[in-house]
Amino acid sequence: MGPVRGRLIAALALLAASMLAGPARAGVCADLRPDWVAGEGTFGALAEAGYVLGSPIGMILLALVGLALIWPRRWLAVVVALPVLGLAGLLFLSRQAETAAQAMAEGCIGGIGPTVVFLVLLAAAVLVRGFRPRRRAA
């Protein structure tokens, strides 16, 4: 076996060993999602959206969005849209952390793209509905 092939095999073995779940990765998922079991499979983007929107803060924000869409007022649109956009920004920025990358590699958290897009669209709908001129009854 030549020196190039020996190094290539060693590099592939090192790569395979680094892809296995080690104690550092297992600790990340145990801290972030203690109820997640590796045998259940990885979290997808839609499962992550359900997890975020089904959390207490997600349910409160969805209720406030519903209230703002039913009762269109400018002040209410601003008060509701700001926390919704804040949550979208927080979710986006939280996925930039190293622990989030490790947890995504392990499979206990999914992509956050559809959730962020959905939250931004909800905030836009609330703002458009709240700032739309009302028709006066004649």
Image (cartoon, rainbow, N blue to C red):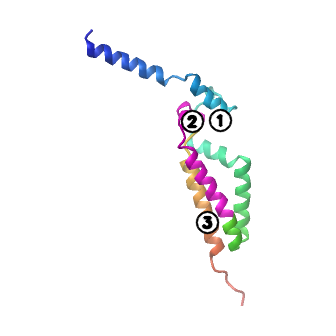
Do the CB atoms of the residues marked 1 and 2 lie less than 8 Å apart?
A: yes
Q: Is residue 8 magenta?
A: no
Question: Disc 1 vs disc 2: which is toward the camera?
Answer: 2
As drawn, 36 above or below 115 = above
Q: Where is residue 74 in the image (x, y as percent from the top left)?
A: 68, 73
Residue type of the residue flagged with mark 2: Thr
Work out how far the residue at label 2 is from the one at label 3, CA to CA, in angstroms. Answer: 33 Å
Q: Main secondary structure of the magenta part?
A: helix
Which mark, by number, is residue 99?
A: 2
Of callouts 2 and 3, the N-terminal one: 2
- Pointer 1: what residue? 32
Of callouts 3 and 1, the N-terminal one: 1
- Pointer 3: what residue? 125
Work out how far the residue at label 1 is from the one at label 2, CA to CA, in angstroms. Answer: 9 Å
Q: Is residue 133 left or right of residue 16?
A: right
Q: Where is residue 122 in the image (x, y as percent from the top left)?
A: 62, 61
**Dot 1: element:** helix
**Dot 3: element:** helix
